[in-house]
Amino acid sequence: MPDRDLTTAGSSSQERPANRAERGIFVPFTAPMLWGGRIRRLPGSPPELLLPSLTGRGTYVLDWRSAVAACTPSLHDRQLWARLSLLQHPTPAAVRGVVRKVALMGHAGRPAQAAAEAALEEQRAAIQSVKAALQARLPAPLDAPAAALLGGLAEALADSGIAATVPGPQSRQVAGLEAFCTDLCEWTRRVPAPSGRNAGLVVLAAARYNLASIRACLAALWPLLDDLPGLLARGPAGVRLMAELAERPDWLLDGWPPITALWASAPVKDRSALAAEIAAIFPVPALETDRWPGGAMDWDTVLRGRRLLGSLPVLAGTRLVEMAARNESLRAMTA
Amino acid sequence: MTIPGNAERGLRAALADAPDHALGRVVAMLDALRDRSEVDILLDGIRPRLRRLRPQRPVRLGRLLCLPLEGVLVNPGSWRQSPLLVPRSAIRPITAAVAVAVGEIVVELEVLAAGGSLSDEALVQALGERLWPAAGRATLPIPPQGWSEAGLPDDSAAPMLALCGAIWRHAPALWAAAYPGAREGGSETEIRAALAPLAGEGRAALLAGLALLLRDATRPGVAVCVAGSLMPSVQPTAEQELAAALTRDGALVAGAASPGEMASAAQRLVRRMEGLEATDNPMARDQRRQLALTLRREVGAACYTLYDRALAEGLLAEATRIAAGPPATDEQVAMLERMARDLRRLEVAGRRLAAEAAFDRTLADTIGRLLPLAASRGGLARVEVARLVEMLAGPQAALPLLEG
């Protein structure tokens, strides 16, 4: 198995891509050398794999053939990529759908299979619950076209929910990120400097910025539903608008749930090394998100801090086997 | 608490035979006892395993004080009044004396350590930085109260306390070098920063610091070179200690009861032997080369023997049996996958020591016997057999099962 040392392969792209399409979406690969990888598909181009550099500086851009040669993808990863590469416009939700399908086939093991089944069931229930809550806000029953629009709206808002009192599955991920910030903050206060504190502080800043943006996006999303009849009166354009706005917190959360699950499940003795690992791979939002609710965060300082951290050790030996098992176990925690 | 002789022997044997997951629980139970004086003796036989497993153990003053002394702590029976060693029976009177001398800090530490565990290296480092230098500067009574009751001669107190004080004064740097946050281990600069002040305290303190680094440090060979450069007269002793430490590591591998345990111990040995022969001293280089050769041959052979047996009698036999039966339960599949991953780890670590060709042959033979199970339409789904093959031999070996 080759070591994950790709310092001579490909060139580094910008640290903050201009938009979501350039940034790509986190893919829960299980192969250790693909950990933290993202898929992106620019218009008119084949899909590309983006891999964070172990130095925390820049990203490698690879085609899948190079990834197979250099990173030893698992059977699961190969199945996943074969299906993801068919997506013309990958989004976090679309990638999540494919990831669950591959998990249902058993490629990530039985716990991940069961978790994917449960997640799909939860999503179905969330759509029904959001639909019922939206219907309850309307003064009169809807005609067929408006009911279809309402169904589309419920699907678009199923993950985010439509109010703090009608939350979607996403609220659990937001709570996970909040808990991660609290725990990491407490840890960085008492950990001595050479033991990953600097890495922890960089990650903490990134997680807090992201959390603030997510909260702002959700806070801006839900009030638009106050005038639900007016929204439906706009026809498909109204649903598209809500779907676009509901996607924003999803994009901002993309890549964080595995990180928070990993931190929560790691023994304390592993946290210093884990902080350094997370610092190298945490997702950075695209520049376009600066125009979203919540405004621009000081990502330049966060990224400057990340560049000052030391490189991660090259993965080798039994650590590769252990990490593959670890990455697979995350699939059961974040289906 | 007094443990009768028969019961003590029985407890020792039970602890030695306990599986890894049970050992952590037993140790936690023993740690909860108020009087640990006899418990410490019970734990002697399993200390090497405890070092590897590092179960969650609450932070107590005595244990925190002992951490940087671990290199010089011995069973009372093997102490023989050596000025370089501290018998475990001295821990209690020394801890009590320190508690009196640095009382305010002890109260503060109790608050900070509440709920923490010794496996939290960051916490240990932070608490140690407060406690160890203060303990090193403290004036302790000679002998401390309870010294003779612990079976220690009065004249042993002064040199022993002097050695402990010297180590404690420089323990933060020593601990940081022995257990660095980074996975790749402490750098030569960190090791030098840890040992140089101990060399200033004298030969015994330097050897004590080196002994701690030799127990777990990723690059013990570098630590010996640094110690030799700081005080050339310790070089022969240090080389002997290095050989003894690595030989103990080798014995831990050979004595492992399961593939998973053996894989962890073998990987540790492989990492500790990396760069072992990099020394400017030609005689030491020859000795180390010989030691490395012997360890690779003997430990590599032990790894292969267990791998071969566990593969045939464990994984292959179980997979064949389950594949022939009704649909496998989640627990059965999880067990097979755990076995496969442990065997893979053992193979990866073992082939870095020796017997590479033998590992290749056995693996190829096993894969050849596992592949047909995918067609049996029995207890294991095709994808589950493919995953087992992948875990054992990598994704390339399993591809035919998904492409066929």
Image: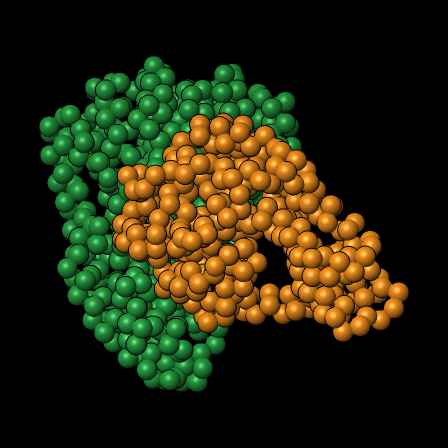
Rendering coords of residue B132 (x, y %): 49, 24
Task: Name the quadrant containing residue A5.
Answer: top left
Is residue A23 visible to the viewer in this orientation of the structure?
A: yes
- Residue name at image x 30 percent, y 68 percent: B398
The relative height of residue A159 versus residue B201 in the rendered view (above or below) is: below
Task: Identify which residue is drawn at 32% across, 46% down.
Answer: A4
Position of residue A304 in the picture relative to residue B292 (left or right): right
Camera-side residue: B404 or B342?
A: B404
Residue A18 picture location, percent across and down: 51, 39
Q: Kindly indicate the quadrant of the structure image that contains residue A60.
A: top left
Q: Nearer the viewer, residue A137 or A129?
A: A137
Q: Which chain is orange?
A: A
Up-down: is A48 above or below B246? below
Q: Is residue B97 visible?
A: no
Residue at the extreme right:
A139
The shade of chain B is: green
Residue B244 lies, in percent from the top left, at: 24, 39
